Amino acid sequence: MNDPTNSLKKSQARLAHEFNAVLDDAQDLLHHTAGEASKDYAEVRDRLQNSVKSARDRVGSIEQAVIDSARQAGKSADGYVRSHAWESIAIGAGVGLLLGLLIARR
């Protein structure tokens, strides 16, 4: 994989991790405040709980969509390499030759 793709994947993973941490914190807050008696507070707490559940569901579906998209991209790349096998071999050999020459110079 190229550097921008790795960077994008790392950023996506970090964002997903941070978002899940926020959801975990909100869920902990809901559990710690379960004993509050105010009616208004209970309504707000219920709305927040529903929002957290909804956000978790959406994150799960987005994650699945990203996985499906990555699989499709992999299949497309595989199809391209299979249909252009000799070109792919030539490119791989050329890159290997260049890397070998660069390593040998050091």
Image: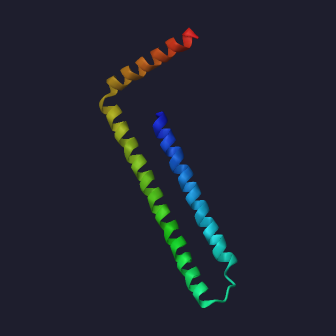
Relative placement, left or right, of 65 versus 100 is left
The C terminus, quarter of image: top right
**Which quadrant of the figure has residue 64?**
bottom left
Relative placement, left or right, of 3 versus 40 is left
Q: How is the image coloured?
A: rainbow
- Residue 12's place in the image compared with 37, above or below, is above
Q: Residue at x 47, y 19 (%)?
A: 96
- Residue 44's place in the image compared with 64, above or below, is below
- Residue 61's place in the image compared with 53, above or below, is above
Residue located farthest toward the top when viewing the structure as drawn = 105
Indicate the position of residue 80 as horizontal and vertical percent values: 32, 35
The residue lying toward the viewer, choosing from 86 and 94, is 94
**Which quadrant of the figure has residue 86?**
top left
**Which quadrant of the figure has residue 21?**
bottom right
Q: Residue at x 52, y 76 (%)?
A: 50
- Residue 61's place in the image compared with 2, above or below, is below
Number of marks present in the image shown: 0
Indicate the position of residue 16 as horizontal and vertical percent values: 54, 55
Residue located farthest toward the left when viewing the structure as drawn = 83
Indicate the position of residue 99 as horizontal and vertical percent values: 49, 17
Q: Residue at x 35, y 32 (%)?
A: 81
Relative placement, left or right, of 26 versus 97 is right
Indicate the position of residue 46 as horizontal and vertical percent values: 56, 81
